Each structure stands twice: as structure tokens, then as C-alpha cells.
Image: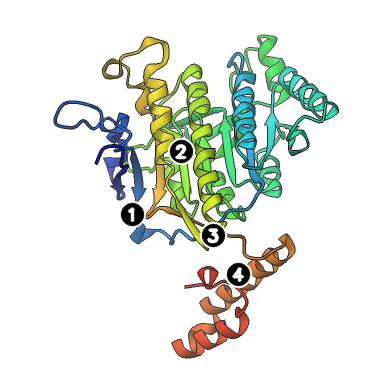
Amino acid sequence: LPHQMRPLFVMLRPSDAERINWEMLCDGDDAFIALDERWPIARIIDPINAPPRLPCELTTPVRLMAVISALGIRDQRKEWELLRDAVAYARGNGLRVKLKVLVGDSKSFEAIEKEIAQAKANNAPGADDTEVGPIETTPSRLTQRIREWGPNILHVFCHGRADAGGQALEFATANDHLQFAAKNPDTTDGSVVVSAQSLVTLGASLVNPWLMVLNCCSSGKAGVGLQSMANQIVSRGFPAVVAMMEPVAANDAYEFTRAFYPRAFDLLKQASDELANKTSASLEWTPAMYQARCAISELDGREAENSPEWSLPVLYLRGVDEQLFVRPMGHTPQQSEEYRVRVETVGAWLRTAGQQLTEAQRIEAMEAALGSVPRMFWPS
């Protein structure tokens, strides 16, 4: 039917199939399927080898953290401005969003800090829900800072690599930027290198994650017999990851951010509105991918058939079902945390001592321990 969305999913089992640019599939008329709003394309990993995708709590304010520091990229403050404007749009549309940005370049940091302070002085809407911080100087400190803040959406803008040297993201500290500006020949890469495994560990440790956006070169690039960073993160339990299949130009990365986030926030607002009258609501990220791909395909007067850049953003999901959002477990953050601890404790018990009981006994024990916790959160 016209305007009825039916996303197409490519299931990627461990093989070289991940290296194929499925996003450039064409229909019988040689039109790109992914540039038709009815048929956005996403990638799913083999659910047989992955943990189930559990419901996410749609808590508000939505917590969006952006880490922005790509050595040698001019005007990367633009990435902040595009995110800031998208958040302002969401807030104006009735969706509360809390935004924190970590920035490496000292000039950008000072400008953003001044901008936020001025907004607070003017009592601008949402000013108290916006903050800035520096890039930490080691990978473990950076991932710890992210984990402690607990984003629902983690957005990353930096250099990425997936080659014989390994798979990693490179963040530049304030000192890296200064050394690069001084044309120090030894400063060619960001000194804070976060490996693919560290990203996997980070993703698995976040409390209520919804989406990770790796607006970085080659973050969705697979090697011979080696899965991409995005694939690995989703395989370990993160609900959804957007990545770039190949190296991407800065202007294309900016255009992705500009087009993707307003649509993504619209989708979250719709799900939030549904939860006012329902216990759960489903969400597909694919419409936001369609929006971003179309925007990149039209940048600078391009023709889609001659400009494959629009196909580089790829969406990885775990399983074909829509992402399920539910109301927060409790009426207060304290109650939600209490519920979460109880569920995790019972889950650990089921995997160990509980294995010695019958199924009926295990169910009886769960009912006793989790009676007040919504059943959708109970361990399987």
C-alpha cells in the first residue's frame, strides 16, 4: 500500500555477507529500495546466537550523550550545533531531553560552555538539561564517564578504523588538538583509543540503553572472518546500533546528524504518547534511517546512482521484531532501581542454585520474589 512502511531486514550470520552493501538493493525498475519510504533497510544479526532483546524503559527526560572529538576535522563544533538544534526541536515538541556533550577541542569546549552559561542566564528552555565536559585522557576513564552518566542514546563523532591494525575508535584530547594545530609530526591520531571490545563491554554495562550511533568512519565495516564493531555491540545485547560501513566525509556525517535526530525524536515522542494509555509501545528506527539516507543522497546536488555515500549509514538490530518500550518499572527512580536489582538477583539465582529445582518450583520462587514487578521484566 502507498506510504505503508514495511522495512526490509537482511539477516547476517557469521560470514562475509556483512561486507556486502545491501543498502543499495534495487527494485525491478532499478530504483533504490532504501530510498523509498516504504522499504527502509536494516541489518539483523542471527538471533539464535544472541541474547533476546528485552523491553526498554521509556524514561524521561531522554538521556542523550554525545562524544565529539575527531582530530583534524575542521568545524566539528557543527556536530554539537546540529545535535543541540535537534534537541531543541524535540523539547519544543513536548519530549524532554537531557543532553551532555564531551568535547576534546579546547576552543569548541569553551565556546559550548559559554553558550550553555548564557542560555542558563537567560532562563532559556532546557538550559538546565544541557551540559558539557572534556574528553578524558584514557580509554577506561572515558568509558567510565559514559557509564556513570548512563545515556539512553550514545552518539559518537570521532575517527574510526577497521583494518589490519584492529577495530577501534580514536578520540583526541585537548592536548592532541593543540599538538596537531602546532603541526607536531608525532600527532596524527587521537590518543584515546577505545577498542571494539571496550565498546562491547560499555554497551553491555549501560542500565537502560536504546541506541548507539557511531558517526565514525568504518564503524560498520567487517573484515574477512571478522564482524564489524556495530555487529559485535548488538550481539552482546545492545538493542540497536547505527554505524558507517566505510570511511565517511565530514559533511556527510554532519548531514546524517541533521536529518536523523529530528525523526528519531519524533518516533520516541510517538512511543511516549502511546504509553500514556498502553503498557507498551513498539518503535522502528528505520524511518529515521530513511530520512538520513535521502538527505545525504541529495547533498550538493548529487545523483543517488552516482553517489553511494548515502548508503554508508547502516542500522544493526538484534532480531526482526520492533524495539519494545514500556513504562518505567516504578513510579520513582528509587522504586525502578529496587525492581531492577530484584530482577537481576533472581536472574542470577535462576542460572545457579535455581537450576536444581523443578520448573514449577522456579516459577513459584519468582512469583514470591517478583510479585510487584511487571511480568514483562521477569527473567525468562
Assign a secondary structure to mark 2. strand
Q: Nearer the viewer, residue 296 or 189?
A: 296
Assign a secondary structure to mark 1. loop
Assign a secondary structure to mark 3. loop
* Distance between the alpha carbons at the discs numbered 1 and 3: 34 Å
Q: Is residue 122 left or right of residue 59?
A: right
* Distance between the alpha carbons at the discs numbered 2 and 1: 17 Å
* Quadrant where the image shows the N terminus: top left
- For label 3, count other residues whose C-alpha is less than 10 Å away and answer few (under 14), some (14-19) or many (20+): few
Which residue is labeled 2 in the image? 242
Which residue is labeled 1 in the image? 46
Which residue is labeled 4 in the image? 344
**Residue 93, picture quadrant:** top right
Assign a secondary structure to mark 4. helix
Residue type, mark 3 in image: Asn
Which of the two discs, 4 and 2, labels the residue nearer the N terminus?
A: 2
Mark whose residue sits in front, 4 or 3: 3
The extreme front residue here reads 277
Place of residue 28 in the rendered image (x, y in percent of width and height, measured from the top left): 14, 31
Q: Is 238 above or below relative to 327?
A: above
Which residue is labeled 3 in the image? 277
Q: Could you tell me if residue 195 is visible in this image?
A: yes
